[in-house]
Image (cartoon, grey):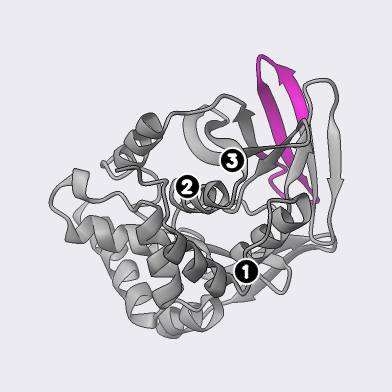
């Protein structure tokens, strides 16, 4: 059975969660879906840290679209770029959008970031609900395209060979990732999801949460000391200090993830540091 296939009832449940109605696949509806998703489903490592600890076998760890959606609807869970972009792509596919999933690079790290390419009216659009991008971003092999949004500006610069550098401004780290505009098969992508739960996987050793709040993405990273929330927009960098004594509850209140899950993930990360 394909993990990308969502049945009609489940799709209706997902749309109800997003507070949207089923519509024909238009560009405007695509952006409405993106906007609703990124406000409700965070990029986060909490759920994967907990699941990795609970599952003895790596093969039982991957969180595929139905599980990601169920966790989002049940308790506000999300996932890493592999998981939530795959879940969102499953919804788009069920709604009649055409496209494919990609594996992309970040500097020297290869195939470490997932994103979606949607084909619409003979134009390719980059969709990434994990970054997150607030809307679908057109790109072309013939020209650099600049996208201006109320939050940040995005630049997609062709490098040749189906590769594009993605940048965001203003930002302390303008480089986002390098898109490899090559369709990845369902089998290969799911193998990448599973491999990301190996000891070499990403974000199993730190709690990271990133979510659109009030039209801007706020980030928590447990490796950043002292603890804080960070956000970049057209006015620069913004920081909110966090009290270590009330950290789990503060993150739960901010990102709408249960405090007990946040606390469990933070404790597991601290245990890893002690045993290393």
Judging depth in this view, the residue of 153 and 69 nearest the camera is 69
The residue carrying mark 3 is 116
26 vs 71, left or right, is right
Q: Quadrant of residue 273?
A: bottom left
The residue carrying mark 2 is 86
Q: Earlier in the sequence, mark 1 or mark 3?
A: 1
- Is the Cβ of the residue at disc 3 closer than 8 Å to that at disc 2? no
Judging depth in this view, the residue of 229 and 47 nearest the camera is 47
Looking at the image, which residue is at 61% across and 75% down? 19
- Categorize mark 1 by other alpha carbons within 10 Å: few (<14), some (14-19), many (20+): many
Q: Earlier in the sequence, mark 3 or mark 2?
A: 2
The nearer-to-camera label among 1 and 2 is: 2
- The residues tagged by marks 3 and 2 sit, at their Cα atoms, a distance apart of 8 Å
**Which secondary structure dominates the residues rendered in magenta?**
strand
Looking at the picture, how far across and down is residue 127, in whole percent? 65, 45
The vertical placement of 91 against 160, above or below, is below
Q: Quadrant of residue 49?
A: bottom left
Magenta range is 157-176
The vertical placement of 14 against 1, above or below, is below
């Amino acid at each position: 059975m394909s993990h990308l296939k969502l049945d009609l009832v489940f799709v209706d449940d997902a749309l109800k969660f997003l507070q949207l109605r089923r519509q024909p696949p238009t560009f405007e509806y695509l952006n409405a879906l993106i906007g609703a998703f990124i406000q409700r489903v965070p990029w986060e490592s909490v759920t994967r840290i907990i699941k990795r600890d609970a599952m003895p076998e790596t093969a039982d760890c991957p969180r595929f679209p139905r599980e990601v959606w169920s966790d989002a609807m049940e308790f506000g869970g999300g996932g890493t770029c592999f998981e939530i972009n795959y879940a969102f792509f499953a919804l788009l596919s069920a709604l009649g959008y055409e496209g494919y999933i990609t594996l992309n690079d970040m500097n020297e790290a290869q195939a470490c970031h997932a994103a979606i390419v949607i084909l619409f009216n003979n134009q390719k659009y980059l969709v990434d609900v994990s970054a997150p991008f607030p809307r679908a971003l057109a790109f072309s092999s013939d020209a650099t395209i600049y996208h201006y949004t109320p939050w940040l500006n995005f630049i997609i610069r062709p490098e040749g060979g189906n590769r594009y550098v993605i940048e965001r401004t203003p930002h302390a780290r303008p480089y986002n990732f390098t898109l490899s505009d090559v369709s990845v098969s369902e089998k290969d992508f799911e193998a990448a999801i599973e491999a990301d739960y190996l000891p070499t996987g990403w974000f199993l050793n730190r709690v990271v949460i990133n979510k659109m709040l009030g039209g801007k993405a706020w980030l928590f990273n447990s490796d950043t000391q002292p603890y804080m929330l960070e956000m970049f927009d057209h006015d620069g960098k913004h920081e909110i200090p966090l009290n270590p004594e009330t950290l789990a509850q503060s993150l739960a209140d901010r990102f709408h993830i249960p405090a007990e899950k946040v606390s469990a993930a933070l404790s597991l990360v601290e245990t890893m540091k002690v045993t290393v």
